[in-house]
Amino acid sequence: MSLLSMIALSLFAQDGAIREALATVDDETREFHEHIVVLSSQWMDGRLPGTPGMERAKDYFEHHLRAVGLQPAVEPRTGHPGGYRHPFSLGTDFIRSGQAMATVVNGELDEFQGDTDFMLTGMGAGTDGFAGQAVFVGYGLEVEDRNYTNFSDDTDLSGKVAVFFRFEPMDENGESQWSNRRWSRDASFANKIAAVGSRNPAAIVILNPPNCSDDRAESMIAATQRLTSRFPIYMCSIEAGDRLLKALDAEGRSSSEFRELADQGSGPIPLTNGMITLEGTIEEEQQWGENVVGLLPGRGDLAEQAIVVGGHLDHLGKGDFGSRRGAGQLHPGADDNASGSAGILMIAKSMAQAYADLPEDQPARSILFVGFSAEESGLNGSRAFVDDPIWPLSDVSLMTNFDMIGRAIDGKVQVAGAETGVGLRAIIEAAVEDCPLDVTLPSRSPGASDHTSFLSREIPALFGITENFHDDYHTPDDTSDKINFVSGMQMTRLFADIIKSAALLPERTAWIPRSDRGSGRSAGNDTPRRASIRVRFGIRPDSYDDDLTGILVGGVTEGGSAQKAGVQSGDILVGWNENTVENVRGWMELLRDHDPGDVVAITVLRDGKQVQLKARLEGRDTEG
Ligand SMILES: [Zn+2]
């Protein structure tokens, strides 16, 4: 590390000294700093895909790709102009309008508050307006095996609103009577909607039950999968459910009393004291994500081959998912990954200049600079980039990824993936010679990020990340004032050197299959595969049976990796990086491959919906 950067670093530690510190660094470092400050500002709102803040971040990124002369690389397609934007589906979202619910008792209207007391769910249709009587049908269940039903033979709900509790019969502790897991499979929404739906209701209102052990009862966000288009399905909070039952029941019974009846397996109970009115429409809307791409065209024989220089531009917004603390507050994501995005812009600028300065007959590979979107929700942008490529994948010779390059401590950084392509290690080692950072080349990737999508297609990929993990990761405290601009820019220059060498190399950096790696590095000292599992995820698996794909999470360790990642008991773990989790045994094999500190992208099923999370694995010996 240079004396100048030492001075700069020590100044960063003092309040109000950033201006003086920046005065001691070069123009490039100042520019790198500015990109990070802008991208992690309030103006970008945490860069959550689908929000205006992310639109601004994409505009900013595209502006700077254009400014250095990069070209559009995406062909127009149906419904999308292409250009500098590579679109991909982000699934569907539900758009509600005019949702209303009220009870009418003796001509008196009692209106419930949308999104607070009730919600029109995406499980059903909408309604222009409906008024009718309600019928309480327990848990809305008919389970032959258990001899349990909330219906009588002739129950016909035509013209009525079916009202029932979420989950299934409970004991006095609010836990299932039927299962020692959280709930049995009978409790699924699909089962209930089918059982109640076959009795022709005009609408369904599902009540979160009182005194229930499952904290999901506090939320009305549930399955977003459409289960019927015949009638609307509403969901009520615990409090609103109580208010609704007391108003409509001729005896004025509370929801606790109704729960007791349902727990005993009551049949239908007409709620005859008044009417219920419902309104609201719900539409599915296709959600699009966009990667931002700029092309630096190659020359001569090598122009058909491309190098992808990428990193994710998106972050967590206000921490709606993936937050480790402070959900609801701005998550600036200065290190994760405004730092990497800034690095890509700086490399784009220097490579555009380098190509302009090349001798005219010098062959060079094309370079695609990419700000990926929707990485945080499960590597969606980079997966789309390899699933729906804008450049033939067989002609992509290398990918480089930056994810969190801004918080190096003592100049310690990592470049992973040296063993994935022929000649990469030599290129990296040559570039490191001229780099003031303390660079290590781990033989395994320290985490899943956008490079993972390319590795899965057998494209050599390098991953640049700082070595030390900071506790501000995925919190509102990942702010730009904590970024070490000097080392960040040094990392950026290191990658610019590596990319330039790889771009001009006559032989391409061909893929090295996993089975052929590792020779040379530990020649004569081949370490046997370690048998023990070195990491702890922190869940109590609740299913060892083979009929369920995935692992039912019976409990999460307080303060463990899983809890920090947002895993909840009741979730079903189904995805682990690029692997499907089949059962506990298979998952243990996956765990064997990890070291403490690894970050994995995991997928859980929650209420039938896929939720993407990221977990940082802790060592087995770091309990407490
Ligand atoms: Zn990241």
Image (spheres, rainbow, N blue to C red):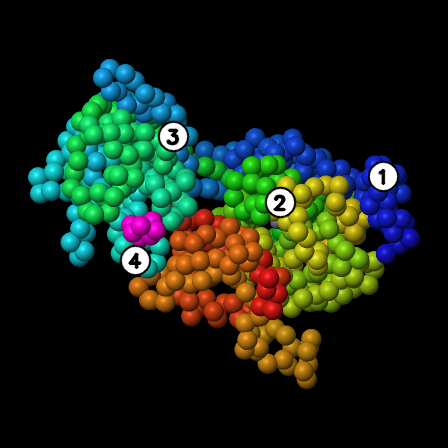
Query: In this rendering, which labeled residue sits more in front, label 3 or label 1?
Result: 3
Residue 610: percent from left, percent from top: 42, 49
Relative horizontal placement of residue 615, taking residue 215 as reference (left or right): right
Numbered circle sitting on residue 17:
1
Image quarter hosting the N terminus: bottom right
Label 4's element? loop
Residue 508 in view in this figure: no
> Are discs 1 and 4 less than 8 Å apart at CB?
no
Q: Residue at x 86, y 42 (%)?
A: 21
Numbered circle sitting on residue 137:
none
> Are discs 2 and 1 less than 8 Å apart at CB?
no
Query: In this rendering, which labeled residue sits more in front, label 1 or label 4?
Result: 4
Real-space Cα separation, disc 1 to disc 4, in angstroms: 61 Å
Q: Earlier in the sequence, mark 3 or mark 4?
A: 3
Image quarter hosting the C terminus: bottom right
Does the magenta stretch mainly form a helix, a strand or a loop?
A: loop
Relative horizontal placement of residue 572, taking residue 56 as reference (left or right): left
- Please name the amino acid that badge 4 sits on: Ser
Q: Which segment is the magenta one?
A: 170-176
Instruction: Classify 10 Å Cα crowding around label 3: few (below 14), some (14-19), many (20 and above).
Output: some
Numbered circle sitting on residue 475:
2
**Residue under pointer 4:** 179
Q: Earlier in the sequence, mark 2 or mark 1?
A: 1
- Please name the amino acid that badge 2 sits on: Thr
Dividing the picture into quarters, in which one does residue 447 lie? bottom right
Q: Residue at x 76, y 49 (%)?
A: 488
Real-space Cα separation, disc 2 to disc 1, in angstroms: 24 Å
**Residue under pointer 3:** 117
Q: Number of marks in the image?
A: 4
Q: Residue at x 56, y 40 (%)?
A: 327
